[in-house]
Structure formats: C-alpha cells, structure tokens
Image (cartoon, rainbow, N blue to C red):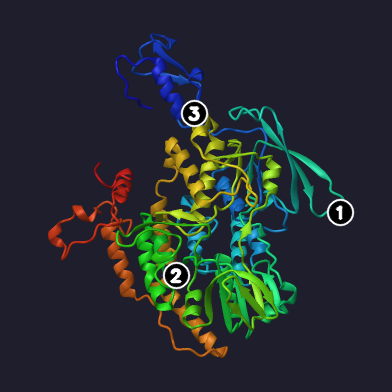
Amino acid sequence: MTLPVQTCTTVADVKVSLAYQTLTDPEALIFIVKQGCSWVVLKDTAEMARRATVKGILSFEPRRCEYPHPTAIIGAGYNGIKHAIYWLHHGDANFVMFDRHDRVGGTAWLTQANKTSRLQTEMAAFHVWFGLEWGPGNDRLGFPTSWETWPAKDKVLEHLQHAVERYGVLPHIRFRSNISDLSFEGNHKDLTDMSRSYWLAVQSVNQDEKVTEDIRVSNIYHFPGAFSNPRIIEYPGEADFGGRIGYGMNDDIPFENLKGSRTAILGNGAFAIENIRTCMEYGAAKVFLVTRRKNLALPRLCCWFCHQAIVPYPAGMLLNIMAPMYDACGFGDPWDYHAVYGNKEKGACTIRSSSRFGIGDVTFLAVATGRCEYVVDLLKRCSRGTLHLQSGQRLERVDNIIKALGLIADFGADRLHKIKEMVGIWPSGDFRRVIHSDPLGMDAQNFSTHSTGGASYAASVSSKFFIDYPAEMQLLHAEGLLDRLPRMRAGEEKPAHQFDAKYTMVSAVTVESMCRRLQFKFFGLDDYMHQLFSAVNPLDKYYQECIDSWDRYQEEWRLQGFEHEYVPYPYTRELVDRWFEEYDARVGPTSVESKKTWRPVAERDSSAQEEPIDLRYDRGGSREWWEQHGALPT
C-alpha cells in the first residue's frame, strides 16, 4: 500500500489512517523497518519512514468479523430468502433460518395472497435475486428473462423456490419452527460489546406438546412481514345484509358468488385494486369501490418507465405521464388527488400517502367501460341487499361485500424482542438485531422504484455490512449516530417495528451519509436497474404486452356477455418516445452509454434547440447527482 505523507507525519498519524482503512485498533498495529541487519520497531512519535512493514493485520482490506455462534434468520419469505442468498453469495454460510410454514414463501404469499393474486409490478423489479451480484455474469441466478412479466401467485412461489434451490439455502432452513422467546447473554445495554449473544427458544409447530429447544445465536434477522392481519371492522346490520361478506385476502372472497353479481369493495389500497381485477375476471356485472377518498392508481407503462430510468423520476413528471390514462378513463386530473402536495403550474410536487400505488390497467378499463364505479363515501350500516352510506346515498341490489380496509402488522415481533423503542431500524439501537418489514405508504419527490426489490436489496447489503464490520458501527456510535436517528414507539394499531416510507428513508439516508464505505456498496445500482430492464422488459416488448393485456380483457368481457364500445389503449408509441425526450432534456440520460456525455439542457448548445425547453424539473438535483457519480465536472 502507498500512502501520501509529509516530513512531519508521525507513525501514530499513519496508524490512525490505516486503522480506519482496515477497521482495526491503532494500538494493534506495529510498524517495523530494517536498519542494517536488524529490524527496529518504530515508536508512535517517530517520523514515518519511506518504507515500513506492518504487523497486526493480515490484509489492507477490512477483515470480516467471525462470530462464535450462527446468525438467526427468522422468516423464509421474500426478505428472508433475499438475505440468505446474499450471505451465501458472499461466502458466509454461518446462519440458520426458521419458519412456521412447511415451504418457502412467507405469510404474504402462502397465506394472505388470494388464489387469483398476481404481481402488480414487473418481475424484473421484484425478483428475489435483484441486485448487483446477480447480473448476466452470474451462472446460478442472472436476469430473469425466462419469467412472466406479471406472474400469478403460483409462479411467484415457484421463483422463490428456484432461488433457494440454486443457492443451496434449503439445508439451512428449519421449517415448522416457531420462535417463542428471546433472551440475552451478556451486557445487551452496551451496544458496542461484541461478547453479547442471544438465546432463542425454538418450538416445533408439529407437536401437540411443545418441546422447546434453546439455540444460541450471535445475530438476529427477523422478518415478521408488513401485512400480517386484515383490519377487522364490523358494520351495523351485517347480519341482515343477506349476501356474502368477506375480506379481500386469504381466499376469503366469495368467488363462487361473483358471476353476474353487484359487488361492493370497501377500501382503496393495493388489495382493493387487486380485488377489482378478480371481480372482473369472475364475471361480476358491477363493482362499487367505496372509499373515503380516491387514491392514486398507477398505469403499468408509467411503472415501467420509472423502473428503467437511471436517475430517479420526478413526481411531477410521473403525474403528467399518468394523465392520458386518467383522461381516457374518467379518473380526473391526477394533480387534484389528495396525495399530491405541489403546484401543477410549477410541475414539482411530493406524493404523500398512507397507502402505495395500486398498479395495473384493469381498474382503469373497468371504470371506462362502466363496470366499476368509484363511490367516495363511507359505509354507515347495512340492510337487506343495501349499503347505507354516511352521505345518505344508498347502494341497492348489492350481492357481496369485500372488505379491503387495510392491514396491520403483528405485535408479536415487538413482544419477542421486548421493544420499547426502535432507534432507526434497530430495536433499542442494537445493530445486531435487524427487524425488517416493507415500509408503509409513500412520501417522495422522486421515484426510483415501485417494487420491493431495490429496498430489500439495500436492506440486505446494509445489515450484513455492519454485522461483518462492527468496528464501523462503533465509529458511527462515537460520532453520535444514535442521537441523529429517528425513533419509533408502538401505537394502538402499529407496532414499533412497522415504519412508514418517510421514517425508513430518513433512517437510511442518515446512516449512509455517515458511512462512506456503505455508500460504495451501492455504486452501479442505477446502471444495473437500467440494464436489467433493457434485457428483461425492453420497451417494444413491454409496450406490446400492455396493449395485448388491455385488448384481451375487453375480448374476455365481451365473451362474458358485457357489451361496450372498444376502448383504445391511451398510450401511443410516439407518446412514450416523447417521455424519453423530456426525460433526457430535464432529468438525466436515457441510457448507460450516454451517461458520460449527458449535460443539463441549460449547458447544451442553444442553437441546436428548435425552441427553449422549460427547465421546471431540473432544479439542481439531477446535476448534483451526476457530479457525485463523476459524470460532470465539479
């Protein structure tokens, strides 16, 4: 290794610099030089020699910490599998997984998903091996080119099974196992004490009499899931309704009663949007979506455009490209929705909502053809075949009620970890216990993804980084990390470990801004995402899939006996080309190859522009991003 020094640089100065680089204790480093036929140990106060041999380290790279006990991964769903294959890819097999089910998939896809559930975002953005390690050069898991774009539930589970088989995860999993208790060994209040460990009480769910096995672990990953239980609300008069009433998950939908029915769906989150599609596919004559206020829904093509973008896509531009679908299908102006905080004339905004986008085109088509109607109101009570709303309006001749009123997380994880407060993403600030569930809602001025793939990958990279290099976390503690992180306590319906999007973003930005080594782990992720979508969902292929799906639904509905005028797909290929032109002018390059030559429009040759382009989106953020990534001179 070569280090720049001055004449006045001391051995102690170099020790401190080298210790930071290698994440070791400066006191453990010994510098020796050869003088004549002897070796001499340099004192800390001595002037640094031009050449010296270093003892006390095996490499000039940080050495991964070795723990005396395995790491526990609780949950073999999407996030548990993601972390497991990340560990194995990096040569670390010192972990054991626990799951209550008898196969991989987790509660979200094994239990809560309906038999008709389908991935709303593209498989490219969702697949469990999303990440820099799984590009085209990986011979075990590469770009998911052979998988459907929007796979159904059985295919999603199949892809999770495929991942664990390809990476040899199955021998690490103890299925049908429940963690009933957690206790601490050592001083768990000293978060920098590396001698502490944890005891897990493991019970088999197969046995009538619970036999407990105590297992000692050094670290814990816990993935309780974000959507554990439906919000249960009983309305007056349900007993007199006379029709079927169910919840929009766990196959509680009255599938056999949907054909030819008039069905009311209560709620407007992603599950509600999915249930509209299910009702259409099962031949419901009319669907009423009863909601307190209308949430933004996202057309498929807009979701794709955001995912393939190299620089995060501004929320204002996202609303503008949503507009043609909204106009064609009678959804109004997306800028007028309650989740939008901004000025349409200025073109900049924040989208803030407690629920995420429902993604898909079927809802728009159902509204356009009159088979679905949004009713902005709340249910007050029921009577025979009738829903009485708070405004006084009545929905009559209703056959089914499907409740999609939101989901709440499981307080069991809080009780297991004895959480009083989450500090950032860690219980009581303990970085060796990671509790992760998908954040709720959205709160953003720019969007890089609408799927869990990227966020889950970032969580797996970050959490393993600090477990591998605990000295880095000790440095952050010394710099006051715990005082800067947001904190969360449990609420009446929300456990402490269940965060919203803003809390999660602030926590991540705080940690990454203080840890440059962690930032380096994510370099190239933007290029990876763009190349991934270019390979798996190139524009022409994806655009045609959207049109084919749009037309196929209309033909299926005609065969079901529902006649309506043909509704053309609202997006033309020429319109999408203009999106790329606008993005290139105002935000960033449209390909990896053009990154080095891209410049903000204000710096381009003005004579080459036929007319000036409005710079309302380029408010300095994109330039700052490119300067940090080395594409622009600073």
Tell me the residue that label 2 is attached to. Answer: 299
**Marks 3 and 1 in Cβ contact (< 8 Å):** no
Depicted 127 relative to depicted 558: above or below: above
Which residue lies at the image location 23% right of the left edge and 60% below the top edge?
614
Tell me the residue that label 3 is attached to. Answer: 475
Mark 1 or mark 2, which is nearer the start of the sequence? 1
C-alpha distance separating marks 3 and 2: 45 Å
In the rendered structure, which amino acid carries the disc numbered 2?
A: Pro
For disc 3, the neighbor class at 10 Å (few under 14, some 14 to 19, many from 20) is: some
Q: Is residue 403 left or right of residue 569?
A: right
- Between 92 and 598, the residue placed more toward the observer is 598
Helix, strand or loop at label 2? It is: loop
Mark 2 or mark 3, which is nearer the start of the sequence? 2
Position in image of residue 66 (x %, y %): 60, 33
Position in image of residue 564 (x %, y %): 48, 89
Residue 148 is tagged as none
Position in image of residue 393 (x %, y %): 57, 77
- Between 602 and 594, the residue placed more toward the observer is 602
**Residue 97 in view in this figure:** no
Depicted 554 relative to depicted 513: above or below: below
**Marks 3 and 2 in Cβ contact (< 8 Å):** no
**Residue 445 in view in this figure:** yes
C-alpha distance separating marks 3 and 1: 48 Å
In the rendered structure, which amino acid carries the disc numbered 3?
A: Leu
